[in-house]
Image (cartoon, helix red, strand yellow):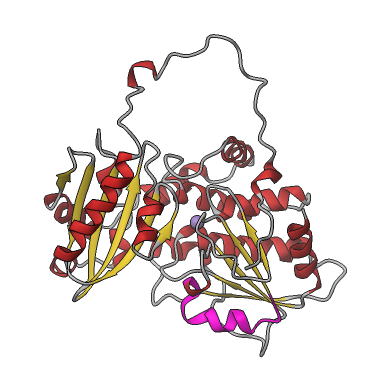
Amino acid sequence: MRSLQMCITDIANSKSIAIFCHTSPDADTLASAVALKKLIKQNMSENSEPKQIDIFVDADEINEINRAMIKGIEINVQNCDKYELGISVDCASSNRMGKYEQLYFDCENTINIDHHATNTYFAENNLVLKTSSTCEGLYILAKSRNYKISDEVCNLIYSGIITDTNNLTQGVITINTHKIITDLVARKINIDALNDHFFKNNTKSKAYLLQKALSSLRFLSGDRIAFMKITKQDMNDAEATFDDTIGIVNHGIDLKGVEIAILAIKKEDNSYYVSLRGKNNVNVGVIASTFGGGGHDQVAAFQYNGLLTDLMPQLTKVCKEELNKHPVEDIGENLFFGDETDSTNSSSDSMEENVEENKKI
Ligand SMILES: [Mn+2]
């Protein structure tokens, strides 16, 4: 794997490295950054001069839940005039680095480690993986090099995987994802505490905001689309932050028969953040890209400047086109029944197959 070898060589040879997260940082981007820093320190600093490794993340505030991952770690302090290497983690395009995008391109060399199908291959070296999360990708890379992976790195990797997959229920979940979870569980990491931390730790504001969003719930296209909205007034009434909106859209896609869930969040006057979820092979990434956004097949989003009343007819039309590609299919009756032969020896996805060739554009 040429691109992987080049990345490893670049990292080994660089004395100063800057790691970049995306704006509105989620657990995967933060966990990836911290895990990568620790993996480099723990595996690539022996017999070489110590490396300066700094993490940059454009965020006014990182919520309390995610802040726990960077506890004690210095961020956004530029300790070098010019870094030899810049590494972006979990960024589908370079503008996802926000105000640190220029600092990234000022680095002598650049690497892009990501798992978004919509990645634009903006770096010198691009490692775009077909994995559930960037954290899963990092684990595969570290394993493939026989690196030491500490318990604290395992906690971070596990956090990135469970949050990006909504606890293994959505996104690109492969046999490897499950194998890695098995590996991590065998390490006796803080599984229960991490699950509670990420999934049973919602704020009161989020509960009030959910109440508001659910009261706006509407069904379209023969109940195959669930639509919800959150107004600025809702945000104020619930004393909520943008972070409190995360995951609310899942309440739409969790409903029986719903194949597309839409949550429109009003950010400024005439400016909306539109979050999408899909199921039954409906590709909401395609829908988001029609409106200049992106993401994954089942999880995507876009920004819209204009009135919601103007957006909705267009959005509904694009959603219907996507739904028409996928006739309603009900496998419910056969869910627990199948071939009675033993298939335990079939299919063994090679972990390395998840790394795509370096496609510089
Ligand atoms: Mn991710």
Counting the numbered discs, the total is: 0
In the rendered image, residue 135 lying in the magenta stretch gets the answer no
Is there any visible trace of residue 76 in the rendered image?
A: no
Residue at (62% x, 36% y) in the render: 179
Q: Is residue 330 above or below residue 111?
A: above
Task: Using residue 316 as the reference point, say whether residue 101 is left or right of it.
Answer: right
Quarter of the image with the C terminus in it = bottom right
Q: Give how far across and how far down residue 345 sits, in percent.
A: 67, 20
Task: Using residue 82 as the reference point, say whether residue 271 is left or right of it.
Answer: left
Dominant SS in magenta = helix
Q: Give how far across and how far down residue 16 sits, in percent.
A: 72, 79
Hey, which quadrant is residue 10 in on the image?
bottom right
Hey, which quadrant is residue 39 in on the image?
bottom right
Q: Nearer the viewer, residue 321 or 251?
A: 321
The residue sitting at the bottom extreme is 81
Is there any visible trace of residue 146 in the rendered image?
A: yes
Task: Using residue 116 as the reference point, say whether residue 11 is left or right of it.
Answer: right
Q: Is residue 280 above or below residue 2?
A: above
Residue at (78% x, 49% y) in the render: 146
The residue sitting at the top extreme is 340
Q: Give how far across and how far down residue 241 sits, in percent.
A: 27, 68
Tell me the magenta residue range: 96-109
Task: Using residue 166 as the reference point, say whether residue 327 is left or right of it.
Answer: left
Residue at (23% x, 39% y) in the render: 224
Q: Nearer the viewer, residue 75 or 233?
A: 233
In the rendered image, residue 99 lying in the magenta stretch gets the answer yes
Q: Give how far across and how far down residue 343 sits, in percent.
A: 61, 17
Residue at (28% x, 52% y) in the render: 318
Q: Nearer the viewer, residue 33 or 331?
A: 331
